[in-house]
Each structure stands twice: as C-alpha cells, then as structure tokens.
C-alpha cells in the first residue's frame, strides 16, 4: 500500500492530463449506457404514444440519442489521445526521476546486483511503471466514477433495480476478477520462473552447442527442454482454465443481474408506481452498465506487475550512496602525491576485509605497481581513490589533503582510468572522446588519438572520427576499444592515472601497442598500476603484492 | 501503449499471415470446436432477445404481472447458463489449438537449430534465440487462441443475426446492411496511411530506449568524466522529442477507431430513432422493435472487436517474422559421413586445408601439418589468425572448403560425426557450463563416471580445491553462464570436463587464460602428465604453455609461417622469436 501511494505521488507533474483522460473515459462509457437506456425508453414511449396511451414530446429524446452517439465516438478519440499524451509525459518524468536517483549510487550500490541482470530488470520495471496510468489508474478510476453515476441515476427510478445492479457490478468487477487472480496467481508465478529457467537453459544450449556435440550430450539436453516445455504447457493450461471459468461466470452474471433488476421492478410497474417505458430502459441500462467495469480485470493483473516493479525500483533508489559527500569542501590540493595510511575497507559489515591495514606512498609523478590474484582486493584501491567506495579505517591523502574532505566529483576530476571494462557509448568515436573534454577541437582529438596509437586506424575507417563504435564498443576490436579509452584519458589530462589490468584480454601484438601508448600517458602523472602479470611491472620503481587485502611483500628495484 | 514491434511492409505481413494459417492445419479439430461453440453461443442471442422483448412487451403493453412472464425469464436464465458453459468450452478448445500449434513450432525450431549447426549459431546471440523459443512462440497464442476462432465467428455472426432481423423488420435490416461494410473499408484506407508513419516512429522509440539504457550502463564511466549529471537533461529532452513526434502520428492513427466508433454507435442510434417513429405511426409492433434494438449492438460487437483482433494478429505476425526467418534459413549442404571409425592409431593430418566463414574472406589457407599419436602440438599466433578455427576443423565441428583432414588414411568427412566426436575431447576458448550441478557438468562427456574419477579430473584441472570449499561442493547448482563462479573457476571446471572424457584427441583452447601464474603452471604440469596415448593440440596465449609442447606451429593470417621445437623457434629469427621477445620485455 505504501508503495502504491508513493507510486501515485510520482504521477504528479502530469496530473491535469491524467485527470482529463479519465473524465473523457467516463464521458465515453456514460454516453454509451445513456444511448442504450434512452433508446429503450424512447421506443417504449413512442409505442405507447402510438396507441394513444401516453403523450410524448419526441423531438428532444430523438436528438439526444443522436447526440449521445456522436459524444461517444468523439469522446473515445479524444480519450485515447489525452491518455497517451499523459502516458508519454509520465514516461519522460519517470526516466529522469529514476536517473537522477540512480546517478549517486553508481557504481558501488549497483555492483551487488549482477550487471546484466540489474539492467534488464530495470528495463522491464521502468517499462511497466510507464504503464501504471494507462493500464491501472485510468481504468480503475473510470470504473468507480461510472458506477457511481449509473447507480445514482438508476436509484432515482428504482432502488431495487439499482441494488441488483450494484451487486452484479461488484461481483463482475471486483469479486470475480479477484477470485480468478488468486486462483491463477500460483501457476502464473511458476510460469514466470519456469520461463526464465527455460530461457537460460536454451541460451546455454545455443552457446554450448559445439560442446554438447563433442561431449555427446545433445540428446540429454534436448529431452531436458522437452520436459520443461511440457511443464510450461501444463501451467498455461491451468491459467486458461481459470480465465475461461471467470469469463463464463461473468457472462452469466450480466444476464442474471438484468433479470434480477426486472424481477424487482415489474411489480412496481403493475402497481403503476413505475411508468411502462422505464421497464424497457432498466433492462437495457443494466445490460450496458457492465461496460463500466470491463477494464477492471486487466487493471488488477497489471497492478500486481506494476507494484512488484515499483517495489524493486524503490528498493534501488532508496539505497544510501556508498560515499557521503563533505558538507563543505576543503581547499584543493596543489600537489598530487598519494598516501594511504593504515587503510581498511570492507564492502559489507558481514564480509571479510577487502583491504586490511594498507599503507603506501606514491610521490607526485611517480608510479606504484600492485600485483595480486583475482579477489586479492587490488581493484578496491582504485575504487577508493575515485570515491566510489568508503573505507572504514585509516586515511587517504592526495597532495596532503584527506580525500574525505573533497567531493567525489573533485576527486574524479583528478583521475583518469583505463580498465578492462571501460564503457564506450553507442555513438561515434568523436562523441566518446568529447565526454572527456566537451570543448575538444578536432586537432586535440587527433593528437590524443595519435598519442594512444590509434590515429592511423581511425583515419583509415570510412567515417573516420564519426565511426559508430556499436553497442558497448562491439564494432571495434578489443585493442582498438582500449586505445580509444586511452585517447579519452589523454584528452582528460588528469594528474592521477589508474590502470586496472589495462591489457587484459588482448593478444600479444595489441598488448604491445597498448603498453607503448600507456608509457606515453604515464609521463608526469602519479600512476597506480594494478595487474596480475609481473612482466607489466618491469620498469616500475615501487611494487607490492596484495593477498586477501593485505600487503604481502614490497620490492624496490 | 504503442507496440514495440516494427511494422512491416504489407506484402511481408500477408505472407507471414499465410504461414501462420497453414500452421493451424495441425489443430483443425480444436479450432473447429472453438468456432462451433462460439457460433452457437452467438446464435443463442436470438432466442434470448426474443424472450426478453416478449416479456417486456407483456409487462408494458398488456399489464401482465411477474407470474405471467416468470417462465420466459427462467428460460432466459437457462440460456445464460448455457452460454456461459459454451464460452468456457470455446476458450478451452481455442487454448488446446494454440498449444498444439506452439508445440509443433517449437519442435520444428529445435530440429532446425540442430540442422543448422554451429556455423549458423555462431552468428546469433544466444539470448535472442532463447527468448524466440520461449516468449517468441508464446506470443503466437493470441493468433490461434483468439484471432482465428473469433474472426471466423465475427464473419458468420452478423450475417446470421441479419437473417433473423430481416423477416422481423426489413428497414432496420437495411440500415445495418448499409452501415457494416463501410467500417472495414474506412479502416483499411486509414490504416495504410499511418503504416509508414508508424515505421519511423518505432525506430525513434527503439533509439530512445537504447540511449537511456546505454547511459545507465555507462554511468560509472560518465561519472569518471564528471558528465553524469548532464545526462539527465538529455534523457528528458529525448523523451520529450519522442512524445511530440509520437502524438503527431497518433492523432492520425486513432482516426481509424474514431470512424469505427462513429458508424457502430450511430447505427444503433439511427435504428432506435427509426423504430421509435414507426412505432408512433403504428407501422411496426413494439415486440419487433425491441427485438431489433436488443440485437443491434450485438450485430456490431464482433465488428468492433475487429480492432482488437487486428492488433492480436499484427502482434503474432511480428513474432512470427523471426520464427519464419529461422525456419527458412538454408541448411549447410555437405552431407555428413556415415562410416565407422576404424580402431588403431593413425596420424592426424591437415592436407592443404582452406576454410572461410564468408566468401572472399579466407580464414585458413592451405594449412598443412600432422599430429602423431600421443604428440603434444602447440598452436600460437595473434588473435584472429585462425587458431580456434583449426581446432574446430580438427574436432569435426566445421568442414574444410578445400583440402582434407585425415586420420590414418581415412578422410574425416567420410566418418559419421558422432563417431569422431566420441574420440575427441575439448576445452573451448569460452566454455559453457550448463544448468545443473558441478558434478553433472564435469561428467558431461562421461555420464557414467564415478565420483572418485570426477574428483581426480578436478584435481588435475586445479578445480578440486575451490569446489570443495563451496557449501554444496560438487552438488553446487550453477546458474546461467556459470553464475556464482569466476571466469577462472569456470575455465577450470571446463578443463576437468575435458580431462575426464576418455578420448584419443584432446584440444585445449587457451587453457590458462584468466588464471594467475601459479594456477597456470600447475595446470601446465597436469597437461604434461597426461597419458602418452592421447594426442594434444594446445592453443596458447601465453608463450610459457607453448614451451611445454613437443612441437610449435606459428599461425599468421591463416597460414602456418613457422614450425619446430620450442628451442629451435626461439633461436630463429621468425615470428615466434619476435613474439617471445615482446612478451618477455613486458610492460613499458
């Protein structure tokens, strides 16, 4: 419920559009119900008038019938336009809202979830939040308003008929869909889980197709899939059974409600307290009134999805940022030597120390090499300097200034990073370089590319600097992508350089080119080189080895 | 919300519609059942309307009481119950039809994927294929469970209702007859105009979404450059642009529904007014008038539902596009061999083997080498030089374009693929762990292996220690893409798998990548200890591993440029000596 209210508050900025959409929706349904009810009343009245049993002013109702028909058609058109306008405004508001809250959390608080998983979850969740107005809110509010209007009108003619209609609407609009939702919930959830599992297993089969062939395991794998499909079909069958039962029951209840309304109002007509034409009107009005609740079952289904999505999105945005910014920033350092004094870090109170009592000093413009196996904590050193993570003990100084007194943005503006998984954006090489220096001229870009040892290759590309790098830089080779990242670091021209396995995953030739480029980049910058390969550290004066967060041995060569 | 699928040219969508329809042949019976039940359900509207009109006439015009009309009302209740049961049955029959077709399509897709083989799969993203088989096929549901049966009922029912309305009141019959056909005509005219607009709109939406998630994914990089906060404004601007241009399209696109609403609602209104005035002048009976008024909305109902059905159809057609494309991908023509593999220990030979994945881009050119039984041969060279392709050819996963690979003197192409696979074991460059336990993964190629045998293989691959540290040890269930294990751990499990399978040829593609130096050297030692009747092809990234081989082949741009023992190559002046120098020189 709290999530729901919070979700409603998010809808705020475009509420005028949303309210207008709902009012138009009410107009559409009320016009239709009015059209049918008035038609029934009109022909019964005209029949009685034809027999001389009733005097009728026929001009007005005949015109009203046509007016209602036109109002319904035009209203529907406007309703669709306005509700879509509201949805698109909401989509824009939501994405900006989410992004602004996500930004301080990256990357520390997002690492806990696996990258690909988190992203695809966010993708689906944001999409289902986009639909909260169109699929949940608008149909629910419209149904409520229409029901009140219709029943209010009916109650003035016959309280009994109104009561019957109320019961029918409550059963068809509320009780039945809720019962169906409950009955189908378990198999629905199982089906979602099973689909995910099946998808993962089929992806394995496709990826590992050749291994399955060589290891003679293809048949075993296929029969596994067949069994899962059969299970999925059984679940879907159960869901359909529930849906079919609910559909049939709704159809029956609509007719039964109409009959009940007639049964209570016919005696009134006999007693002459109800005019004859009203009987015809009641029958048609009650039948048509179920239009008002037709959108509800869909809304309930969407509500469950949307709330689950909202809960996950709120959970992400409610996370405390890993690093607290200083209330007032200290004066910037003038030099860029780096000092770690007895620094300890753990990512979670329940976890082991990722760094334990680490101390070192890198003189300005000097270099430190850090070796260690996967999981030794060496990447954490860079994360601390970049203020992506907070350390629990000790002190880190840059140019003598404690980095806790500097804002994250300031610290990051001092650092350039080359890592194995540097992100290239799916745009041109030019735009990727511009991130480092928005005002960079073409000449500056070319110089950076030349320093990174990739200028000739970029020039040889048909579109040159405007070559698109593809999703995650996939249109470039691994070595090229790494060197574009190096060019970006040249452009940024920061005094501190963090190299985290800068040549991992490259073949010997690309590695050689990248190492040469890094050699040029290192000139005059305080450098932290993190690697698991001793060859890469050959001409670095100061080297130490990390194991499980502690410094093992130091060497000066 | 607007559909996320790109609209397609009319001709293509019609062809796909035909394909979907042909697929329904397998579910003829349940489909007929669904249509029949739906039609009977619709026809029951006639007696229901007639009885209701008669009851109301009796009350209003003959002042009859509840007792007089009660039997009619009871029958209506009975009919309502019957209709509810029919609708229930129709839904279930339609679902059965859809299930039958979907199962058939999934079978066909799996068979096709097997027939296309790795050459094709290599060009696909595994996640895309997986969601095609699961969600893609499920997206056809609406076509078979809703569109096909309901369209059949929708074409039948209005005509049938008209047949009952005409004898009762021919004037109303003519009004309906005139109004109905106009609707589809208008919808087609307007639909054509919006189709092109939709197409560009769809591209915009895809672009906007992709941009948003690219920014989210690269958030830490943006932060590094202090550009992360500017991106919020850009995201807002892009969605605004999208809203403005989409609304322009929708203003036109929604006109079709306006026309539909206009005709169907006005049809009912005109009938009501006409019936009213003719009643006033005594030209028809009230019973007839009310009967027609009750049926008029039902006459239009299926036509109105056509909009929804049209949408379901387009969605299914969109989903079918990739299914059909996959099923119609031409299969590789080379027929597989059938001969059994003779026992014995012949030499494996590449004889002038050339290979390319795409015409005009040769990957291997006239490769020639031999591996004697029990020999360890290392293959080195820069990435992209064709090392992994040599491994795939050797394993029989691909066939040479020209030249041949022989075992003894028998061409591999003439041997049944499974027979050759039985003799080989392999650790690929990017190994896959399959859903299941670690033990299951290690015994993939030796399903009957005992636990001690599994442990022995894991020990040789340096995997035993970390596996025994896991809470469930060898029974640990691993998630997608080996979730929970590091890259190095996945590779060691894959190595254990390759070592466990009894084989006479073992291919190790970068067995030591992403391992630290110590683990790598332990694994190197395990490879050296392998029994001497197994031939080994080692593809090496690190030159240390190549040094342990009996012989080294140096590959460059698809050709073998050097061959010899490690010592002779190092002493030479060729590529290997150059690479070795670069490698040991290390970082600058």
Image (spheres, coloured by chain):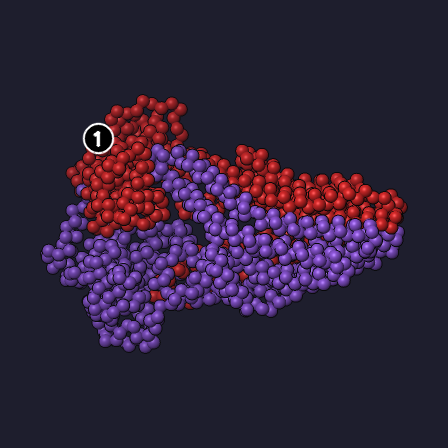
Name the side, left or right, on which A231 lies relative to A555: right
Chain assignment, label 1: A
Using the rendered view, name the quadrant where residue A383 is placed.
top left
What color is chain B drawn in?
Answer: purple
Q: Residue at x 66, y 51 (%)?
A: B264
Chain for colour red: A
Q: Is residue B358 left or right of residue A94?
A: left
Number of residue marks: 1
Q: Is residue B243 above or below residue A478?
A: above
Answer with left or right where residue A11 lies relative to residue B168. Answer: left
Residue wearing tag 1: A363
Q: Residues within 10 Å of mark 1 (few under 14, many from 20)?
A: some
Question: Which residue: 57% across, 42% down?
Answer: A81
The residue lying toward the viewer, choosing from A72 and A374, is A72
Residue A233: give x, y in percent of width and height.
54, 61
In the rendered image of this protein, does residue A255 appear above or below residue B97?
above
Q: Depth check: A232 or B513 in front?
A: A232
Which image quarter: residue B409?
bottom left
Q: Residue at x 42, y 55 (%)?
A: B128
Q: Is residue B81 visible?
A: no
Q: In what element is the residue under mark 1?
A: loop
Residue placed at 21% from the left, 65% from the top? B367
What is the x, y in percent for residue B337?
33, 74
Q: Position of residue A101 (x, y in %)?
A: 45, 35
Q: Closest to the observer: A335 or A452?
A: A452
Residue B355 can be seen, yes or no: yes
């Amino acid at each position: 419920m709290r999530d729901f209210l919070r979700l409603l508050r998010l809808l705020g900025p475009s509420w005028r559009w949303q309210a207008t959409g709902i009012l138009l929706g009410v107009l559409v349904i009320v016009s239709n119900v009015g059209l049918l009810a008035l038609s029934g009343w009109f022909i019964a009245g005209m029949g009685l008038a034809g027999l001389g049993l009733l005097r009728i002013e026929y001009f007005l109702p005949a015109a009203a019938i046509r007016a209602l028909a036109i109002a319904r058609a035009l209203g529907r058109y406007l309703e669709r336009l306005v509700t879509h306008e509201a949805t698109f405004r909401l989509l824009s508001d939501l994405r900006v809202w989410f992004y602004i809250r996500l930004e301080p959390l990256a990357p520390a608080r997002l690492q806990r979830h696996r990258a690909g998983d988190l992203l695809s979850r966010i993708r689906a969740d944001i999409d289902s939040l986009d639909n909260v107005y169109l699929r949940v809110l608008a149909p629910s509010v419209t149904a409520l308003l229409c029901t009140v209007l219709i029943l209010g009108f009916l109650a003035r003619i016959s309280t009994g008929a109104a009561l019957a209609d109320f019961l029918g609407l409550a059963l068809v609009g509320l009780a039945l869909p809720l019962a169906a939702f409950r009955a189908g919930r378990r198999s629905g959830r199982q089906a979602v889980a099973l689909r995910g599992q099946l998808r993962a297993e089929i992806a394995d089969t496709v990826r590992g197709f050749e291994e399955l062939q060589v290891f003679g395991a293809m048949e075993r794998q296929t029969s596994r899939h067949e069994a899962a499909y059969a299970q999925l079909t059984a679940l879907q069958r159960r869901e359909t059974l529930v849906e079919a039962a609910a559909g049939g029951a709704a159809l029956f209840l609509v007719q039964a409600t109409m009959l009940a309304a007639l049964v209570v109002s016919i005696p009134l007509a006999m007693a002459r307290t109800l005019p004859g034409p009203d009987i015809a009107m009641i029958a048609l009005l009650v039948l048509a009134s179920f239009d008002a609740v037709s959108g509800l079952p869909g809304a309930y289904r969407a509500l469950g999805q949307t709330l689950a999505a909202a809960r996950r999105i709120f959970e992400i945005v409610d996370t405390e940022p890993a690093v607290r910014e200083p209330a007032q920033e200290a004066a910037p350092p003038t030099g860029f030597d780096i000092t770690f004094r007895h620094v300890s870090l753990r990512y979670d109170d329940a976890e082991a120390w990722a760094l334990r009592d680490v101390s070192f000093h890198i003189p300005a413009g000097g270099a430190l090499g850090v070796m260690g196996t996967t999981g030794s904590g060496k990447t954490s050193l860079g994360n601390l300097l970049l203020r992506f993570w907070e350390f629990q003990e000790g002190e880190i100084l840059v140019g003598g200034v404690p980095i806790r007194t500097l804002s994250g943005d300031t610290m990051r503006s001092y650092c350039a990073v080359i890592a194995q998984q540097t992100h290239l954006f799916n745009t041109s090489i030019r735009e990727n370089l511009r991130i480092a220096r928005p005002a960079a001229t073409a000449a500056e870009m070319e110089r950076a590319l030349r320093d990174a040892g990739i200028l000739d290759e970029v020039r040889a590309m048909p579109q040159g600097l405007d070559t698109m790098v593809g999703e995650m830089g996939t249109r470039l080779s691994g070595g090229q992508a790494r060197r574009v990242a190096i060019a970006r670091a040249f452009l940024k021209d920061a005094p501190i350089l963090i190299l985290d396995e800068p040549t991992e995953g490259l073949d010997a030739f690309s590695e050689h080119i990248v190492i040469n480029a890094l050699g040029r980049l290192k000139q005059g910058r305080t450098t932290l080189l993190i690697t698991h390969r001793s060859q890469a550290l050959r001409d670095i004066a100061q080297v130490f080895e990390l194991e499980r967060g502690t410094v093992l041995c130091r060497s000066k060569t | 919300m607007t559909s996320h699928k790109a609209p397609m040219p009319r001709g293509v969508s019609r062809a796909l519609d035909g394909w979907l329809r042909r697929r329904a042949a397998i579910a003829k019976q349940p489909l007929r059942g669904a249509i029949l039940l739906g039609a009977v359900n619709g026809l029951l509207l006639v007696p229901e309307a007639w009885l209701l009109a008669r009851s109301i006439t009796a009350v209003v015009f003959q002042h009859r009481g509840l007792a007089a009309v009660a039997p009619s009302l009871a029958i209506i209740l009975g009919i309502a119950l019957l209709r509810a049961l029919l609708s229930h049955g129709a839904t279930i029959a339609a679902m059965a039809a859809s299930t039958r077709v979907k199962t058939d399509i999934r079978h066909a897709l799996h068979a096709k994927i097997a027939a296309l083989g790795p050459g094709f799969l290599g060009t696909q993203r595994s996640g895309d294929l997986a969601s095609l088989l699961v969600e893609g096929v499920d997206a056809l549901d609406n076509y078979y469970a809703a569109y096909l049966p309901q369209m059949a009922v929708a074409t039948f029912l209005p005509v049938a209702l008209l047949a009952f309305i005409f004898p009762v009141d021919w004037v109303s019959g003519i009004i309906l007859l005139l109004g109905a056909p106009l609707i589809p005509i208008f919808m087609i005219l307007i639909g054509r105009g919006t189709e092109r607009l939709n197409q560009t709109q769809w591209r915009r939406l895809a672009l906007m979404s992709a941009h948003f998630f690219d920014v989210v994914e690269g958030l830490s990089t943006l932060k590094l450059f202090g550009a992360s906060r500017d991106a919020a404004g850009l995201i807002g601007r892009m969605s605004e642009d999208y809203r403005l241009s989409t609304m322009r399209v929708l203003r036109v696109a929604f006109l079709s529904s306006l026309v539909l609403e206009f005709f169907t609602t006005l049809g009912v209104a005109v009938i009501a007014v006409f019936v009213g005035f003719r009643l006033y002048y005594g030209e028809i009976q009230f019973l007839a008038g009310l009967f027609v008024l009750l049926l008029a909305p039902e006459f239009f109902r299926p036509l109105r539902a056509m909009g929804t059905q049209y949408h379901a159809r387009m969605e299914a057609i969109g989903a079918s596009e990739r299914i059909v494309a996959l099923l119609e991908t031409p299969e590789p023509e080379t027929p597989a061999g059938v001969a059994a593999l003779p026992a014995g220990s012949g030499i494996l030979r590449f004889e002038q083997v050339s290979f390319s994945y795409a015409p005009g881009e040769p990957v291997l050119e006239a490769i020639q080498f031999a591996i004697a039984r029990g020999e360890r041969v290392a293959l080195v060279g820069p990435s992209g030089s064709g090392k992994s392709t040599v491994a795939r050819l050797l394993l029989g996963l691909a066939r040479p374009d020209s030249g041949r690979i022989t075992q003894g003197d028998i061409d591999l192409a003439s041997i049944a693929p499974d027979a050759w696979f039985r003799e080989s074991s392999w650790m690929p460059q990017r190994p896959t762990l399959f859903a299941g336990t670690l033990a299951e993964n290690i015994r993939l190629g030796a399903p009957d292996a005992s636990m001690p045998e599994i442990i022995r293989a894991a020990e040789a691959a340096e995997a035993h220690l970390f596996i025994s540290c896991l809470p469930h040890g060898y029974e640990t269930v691993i998630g997608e893409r080996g979730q929970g294990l590091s890259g190095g751990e996945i590779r060691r499990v894959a190595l254990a798998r390759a070592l466990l399978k009894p084989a006479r040829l073992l291919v190790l593609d970068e067995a030591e990548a992403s391992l630290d130096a110590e683990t790598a050297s332990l694994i190197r030692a395990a490879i050296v200890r392998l029994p001497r009747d197994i031939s080994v092809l080692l593809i090496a990234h690190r030159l240390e591993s190549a040094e342990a081989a009996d012989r080294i082949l140096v590959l460059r741009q698809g050709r073998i440029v050097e061959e010899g023992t490690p010592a002779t190559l190092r002493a030479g002046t060729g590529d290997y000596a150059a690479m070795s120098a670069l490698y040991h020189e290390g970082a600058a």
